[in-house]
Image (tube, grey):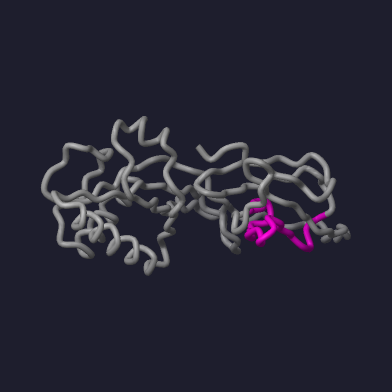
Amino acid sequence: MIDQIDEQLRAWIRETLDVPPPSLSPPDDAQKDRGVNLYLLELVDKPPTRGTRRTPLQIALRYLVTTWADEPEEAHRLLGELVFAAMEKPDLEVELEPIPATTWAALGVKPRPSFVLRVPLQLERPEAAVKLVREPLVVQDAPSTSLRGIVLGPGDAPLARALVELPVLRVSTHTDARGQFEFSNVPGKPFTRRLYVRAKGRELDVTLEQTVEPIVIRFDSFE
């Protein structure tokens, strides 16, 4: 399945730019002529979308996109055209946070202009057989509440526009300019909840055991 995404992205890049087939290998300082690197950095979790059908299995693929050419100006032109073309595609998400220096060091290349493409990948599952209900429906009231918190970076600096997802309800929001977020009308019980938080290319999986608010979520580093 991932190989199909690889080929779809490579075909789209060739339609967008007049370049040879993009390389799926890591960036290389010795590359000649001109071209595009489409390197799969990692697979990350993606909360399922809400729907009436059985929820598909879902992840996201994060590709590091770089360009090269004999002249830096040409490499920059290719990268600029490609990033704006990606922003026009509704099925692609562009991440522009700087790549950590440790990542470039692990790849063995000098830091260079780049961006990350985040591509969803789903595996549909067949609908489960529906059993006949033989007992009367019992409806129980469940109290609702709100869930508020703040996302902080190094030095306890508030992080604006951080993505906060509540997978159990399949809802998400972004932090405001003060790093604050809020979910309204969430079930009051059970108290254990799970949050996914993404900021500047980093992700946290946070499990909440109690409802003390505001919830404080900290990123210690972005390197």
Q: Is residue 142 left or right of residue 175?
A: right
Q: Which residues are magenta?
A: 164-187
* Residue 34 at x, y percent in the picture: 15, 51
Of residues 47 and 126, the one nearer the viewer is 47
Q: Nearer the viewer, residue 65 or 44?
A: 65
- The overriding secondary structure of the stretch rendered in magenta is strand
Where 85 sits versus 181, above or below? below
Note whether residue 205 is visible: no
Q: Residue furthest bottom?
A: 88
Does any portion of residue 223 appear in the rendered image?
A: yes
What residue appears at the point 57 percent right and 61 percent down from the top-left corner?
Answer: 53
Q: Is residue 173 magenta?
A: yes
Q: Nearer the viewer, residue 191 or 97?
A: 97
Q: Residue at x 42, y 43 (%)?
A: 99
Q: Position of residue 106 (x, y in %)?
A: 36, 30
Vertical side of 57 occupied by 74: above or below: below
Q: Residue 45 lies in magenta, yes or no?
A: no
Nearer to us in this view, 193 or 85: 85
Residue 26 left/right relative to 91: left
| Label total for image | 0
Q: Residue at x 84, y 58 (%)?
A: 145
x then y, percent, for residue 204: 60, 41
Q: Residue furthest left?
A: 33
Image-based side of 41 in relation to 17, left or right: right
Residue 195 placement (x, y as % from top left): 67, 47
**Residue occupying the point 50% across, 37% down:** 223
